[in-house]
Amino acid sequence: FSHVMKNVVIGEDCNFGDGSFVESGVTIGNRVTVKNGVSVWHGVELADDVFLGPNCVLTNDIKPRSKVFHEEDIKTILKKGASIGANATIVCGHTLGEYCMIAAGRIVTKEVDPFSLVMGNPARHKYYVSLLGEKLEFNNDIALDSKGNKYIFKNNIVEVIKK
């Protein structure tokens, strides 16, 4: 019960839940999960390993009106490994960084840094998470996750330095 329009690029090993919809012009990477009730609109780009939780909302129009069509092509980009919780709303025109996590039910109104967990409405940075989704505890700007992956916090950005 998924509807995928023409001119869509879908990578390998993707999973689409019931009631999902993908509009023309969308690009979806490999190993992407689109859970039930999610619509992916024109202007949205999903990199590899993105997770879209049940009924999350991706928008593509900042001035929506019935029967009014804008010339603007607003891009919303979800980088590799980004995860969006159930019922969260992503306002169009923003980039969600690699491996960021959006808590369930949140409203994202601005860019989200890589590895950042955002909560609240509007969504704000709470703490950083690992590739596994675990909270990162930094000591002298270095953190490890439970699998031994090593992270560095440099120039206000988290990067994986050893997998």
Image (cartoon, rainbow, N blue to C red):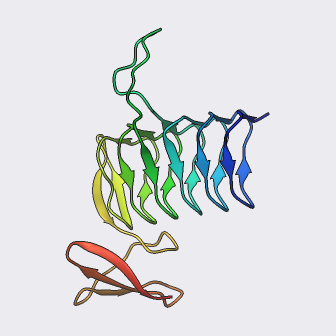
Among the 4 quarters of the image, the one containing residue 62: top left
Q: Residue furthest right?
A: 1
Q: Is residue 114 left or right of residue 45?
A: left
Q: Nearer the viewer, residue 152 or 106?
A: 152
Rendered position, 85 above or below 129: above
At x 36% / y 41%, what residue is drawn? 93
Rendered position, 147 above or below 84: below
Q: Nearer the viewer, residue 118 or 39?
A: 39
On the image, the x and y values in percent for residue 122 come to: 28, 41
Q: Is residue 137 left or right of residue 24?
A: left
- In this rendering, the count of numbered labels is 0
On the image, the x and y values in percent for residue 33 come to: 65, 53
Among the 4 quarters of the image, the one containing residue 75: top left
At x 40% / y 12%, what residue is drawn? 65
Query: Quarter holding the N terminus?
Result: top right
At x 28% / y 57%, what residue is drawn? 125
On the image, the x and y values in percent for residue 98 come to: 43, 65
